[in-house]
Image: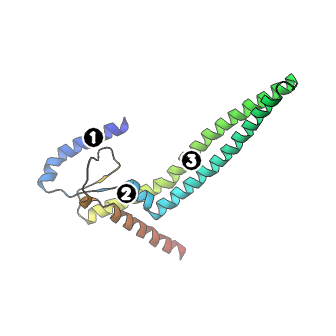
């Protein structure tokens, strides 16, 4: 719903401003923001770190699932020969571990979401600053993101993604050089 409203606002803005911009031969470009994140040095590192966190959580979940499955099989195999109070205790443990697994999975998802925001928000802000600077330096009137739902078409001639990616990576390398000295 939010993206639909944003799309309508952008479309109305383009229609309203469009007539004056077109008369002045507007300079418009677009970027593929997702490509910049996926292919930039910092973006690749952030993706790698997020993937490692995800894989660690998946390993923990698998261990917990194996333990629950082992317990379920034990209950099933010994159900007829086990004393009722021991069986009740094992069933309670099985339910408790299942509940704990569900809680752990929910917490893991939330932790991954928080980590994703922590990793990618600064990158996104830095890329936005590079895009704004690039737009001013090149006299562009409008730069759209290819991933935005309002974006319908863009000629390769106005795609500045690779230029933005190169500038951003160069800034990151220079920043790493300064902090490493």
> Sequence-wise, which precedes: disc 1 or disc 2?
1
Residue 125, x across and y down, in percent: 42, 56
Residue 57, x across and y down, in percent: 63, 48
Question: How would you rate the neighbour count of disc 3 (Cα within 10 Å): few for under 14, some for 14-19, many for 20 or more?
Answer: some
The answer to whether residue 37 is left or right of residue 24 is right
Label of residue 25 in the image: none
> Sequence-wise, which precedes: disc 2 or disc 3?
3
- Label 1 – label 2 distance at C-alpha: 20 Å
Name the residue carrying label 1: 9
Label of residue 112 in the image: 3
Residue 54, x across and y down, in percent: 59, 50
Name the residue carrying label 2: 128
Q: Residue at x 21, y 46 (%)?
A: 14
The quarter of the picture where the N terminus appears is top left
- Label 2 – label 3 distance at C-alpha: 24 Å
On screen, residue 11 above or below 167:
above
Q: SS of the residue at dot 1?
A: helix
Q: Residue at x 24, y 56 (%)?
A: 155
On screen, residue 51 above or below 93:
below
Question: How would you rate the neighbour count of disc 2 (Cα within 10 Å): few for under 14, some for 14-19, many for 20 or more?
Answer: some
Q: Nearer the viewer, residue 49 or 120?
A: 49
Dividing the picture into quadrants, the one containing residue 7 is top left
Q: Nearer the viewer, residue 120 or 159?
A: 159
């Amino acid at each position: 719903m939010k993206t639909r409203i944003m799309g309508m606002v952008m479309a109305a803005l383009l229609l309203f401003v469009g007539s004056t911009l077109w008369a002045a031969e507007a300079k418009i470009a677009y970027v593929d923001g997702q490509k910049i994140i996926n292919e930039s040095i910092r973006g690749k590192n952030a993706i790698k770190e997020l993937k490692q966190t995800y894989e660690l959580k998946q390993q923990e979940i698998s261990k917990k699932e194996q333990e629950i499955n082992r317990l379920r099989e034990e209950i099933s195999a010994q159900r007829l020969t086990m004393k009722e109070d021991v069986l009740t205790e094992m069933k309670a443990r099985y339910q408790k571990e299942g509940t704990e697994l569900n809680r752990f999975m929910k917490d893991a998802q939330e932790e991954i979401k928080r980590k994703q925001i922590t990793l990618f928000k600064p990158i996104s802000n830095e890329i936005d600053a590079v895009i704004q600077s690039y737009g001013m330096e090149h006299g562009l009137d409008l730069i759209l993101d290819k991933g935005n739902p309002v974006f319908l078409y863009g000629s390769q001639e106005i795609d500045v993604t690779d230029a933005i990616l190169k500038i951003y990576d160069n800034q990151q390398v220079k920043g790493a050089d300064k902090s490493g000295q």
